[in-house]
Image (cartoon, rainbow, N blue to C red):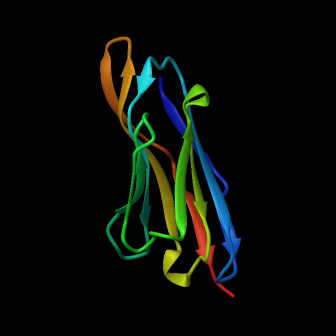
């Protein structure tokens, strides 16, 4: 069984920083893209950032220049460094791996989510 476990959420003041981590565990052959989504109260889940195994990245316009996604392929871990946080960044952040290779094929995996609250 493959799991994604997030950590690093919490309460931060506007303008502050947080770093989220997401570690994949289980009998994994390979992981291509890994990404972060978020869902604010009353809103749909949206893509925040994604990174391929080769290091190519893509960001939502709302976080460009403030958030940085990175990964450690050897540890099957993806990170999201969030700077200059705004109240509108408040959401549950979910880690996602849409194509995880295991012995019987490929599957999509989601983490359980970690809450980020930006408030004074």
Query: What residue is drawn where x is 50% and y is 63%?
Result: 92
Q: Nearer the viewer, residue 68 or 29?
A: 68
Q: Is residue 89 above or below residue 110?
A: below
- 7 sits to left or right of 101: right
Q: Residue furthest bottom?
A: 120
Q: Is residue 89 visible?
A: yes
Q: Is residue 84 above or below residue 110?
A: below
Question: Is residue 67 shown left or right of residue 96?
Answer: right
Tell which residue pokes out farthest to the top in this image: 103
Rendered image quadrant of residue 110 = top left
Picture coordinates of residue 117, whole percent (x, y): 61, 74
Residue 6 location in percent, x, y?
A: 59, 47
Closest to the observer, 62 or 28: 62
Residue at position x 51%, y 48% in the image: 112
Q: Is residue 104 left or right of residue 4?
A: left
Task: Determine the image quadrant of residue 19.
Answer: bottom right
Q: Where is 51 relative to 3, above or below?
A: below
Residue 32 image point, x, y percent = 38, 32
Q: Does residue 9 appear in this view?
A: no
Picture residue at 51% right of the left edge, 75% below the top? 89
Q: Position of residue 41 (x, y in %)?
A: 43, 75
Q: Is residue 31 above or below residue 36?
A: above
């Amino acid at each position: 069984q493959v799991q994604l476990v997030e950590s690093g959420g919490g309460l931060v003041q506007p303008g502050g920083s947080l770093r989220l981590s997401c570690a994949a565990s289980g009998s994994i052959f390979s992981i291509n893209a890994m990404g972060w989504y978020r869902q604010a109260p009353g809103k749909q889940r949206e893509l925040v950032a994604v990174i391929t195994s080769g290091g190519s990245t893509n960001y939502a316009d709302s976080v460009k220049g403030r958030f940085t996604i990175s990964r450690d392929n050897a540890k099957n871990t993806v990170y999201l460094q969030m700077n200059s946080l705004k109240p509108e960044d408040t959401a549950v952040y979910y880690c996602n791996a849409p194509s995880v290779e295991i012995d019987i094929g490929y599957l999509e995996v989601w983490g359980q989510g970690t809450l980020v609250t930006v408030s004074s």
